[in-house]
Each structure stands twice: as structure tokens, then as C-alpha cells.
Amino acid sequence: MPEQRCMHELIVGQCGEAQCAPVPPGLAAHVYVTKGGDCFHRTPRCGALLDGQSYAERLGMNVHDPARTALPVAQSQGYTACSHCFPAQAAPPRR
């Protein structure tokens, strides 16, 4: 079986570009993020995401549509796993 190659024709795991990094077990290759959010989600219909958007809207904040992005890109931008979408990978709550 041939080795998987990234968009830059390098073997997956050898490329230095964030969007080409291998996906850790239990996560998805593409996730959804919102501008101003701090978590990445498995789906744009995540209940926690929708609750957060509803809360922001009630506070008079701008609500942004979820954007699909590669997991490594979301992680490199500081997004963490949603505890509802990815319970095993979510960071413990901050104290």
C-alpha cells in the first residue's frame, strides 16, 4: 500500500505545514470554529456551540457562522476541543 501524501507531495507527518499534520486518534480531520470562539466542534450544529452563540447574541455581541477548517489549523490558532463533541480529548476546566 502506498504511503499517504499531503498536498505538498510529502509523506503525511513529514510536512511542516499545519494543515498537513496527521490527525490524532479520536478527532476529526476537519472541524468547525467561530471567530471569537475558543473551541473547535465536530459539527456546526453542536448544542454547546449553538448555546454559546445564543448567549453571545443575547449579550448584544456579533455572532459569526461556524467555518470549516483543518484540525491542525484550528489547534495552531489556539482552539481547543469542545467537551461535548470530543469528551475524551477536551481539556480539563480552568480553575
Image (cartoon, rainbow, N blue to C red):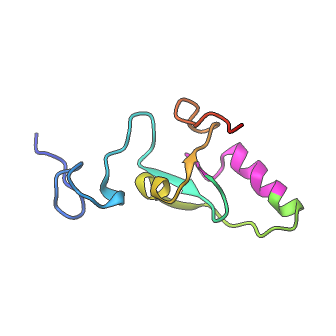
Q: Which residue is rendered at x = 58% and y = 32% of the image?
A: 87
Q: How many marks?
A: 0
Residue extending furthest bottom? 62
Residue 45 falls within the magenta-colored stretch: yes
Residue 7 falls within the magenta-colored stretch: no
Q: Nearer the viewer, residue 31 or 59?
A: 59
Q: Which residue is rendered at x = 54% and y = 29% of the image?
A: 88
Q: Position of residue 74 (x, y in %)?
A: 49, 56
Q: Which residue is rendered at x = 88% and y = 62% of the image?
A: 59
* Quarter of the rendering occupied by the C terminus: top right
Q: Position of residue 63 (x, y in %)?
A: 74, 66
Instruction: Classify 86 as above or below 33.
Output: above
Q: Position of residue 46 (x, y in %)?
A: 66, 46
Residue extending furthest left? 1
Q: Which residue is rendered at x = 76% and y = 57% of the image?
A: 53
Q: Nearer the viewer, residue 1 or 18?
A: 18
Lateral position of residue 47 relative to residue 41, left or right: right
Magenta segment: 39-55
Instruction: Classify 21 as above or below 60.
Output: above
Q: Nearer the viewer, residue 80 or 42?
A: 80
Lateral position of residue 49 relative to residue 14, left or right: right
Q: Quadrant of residue 36?
A: bottom right
Q: Position of residue 27 (x, y in %)?
A: 45, 40
Instruction: Classify 73 as above or below 47.
Output: below
Lateral position of residue 11 relative to residue 30, left or right: left
Lateral position of residue 66 relative to residue 73, left or right: right
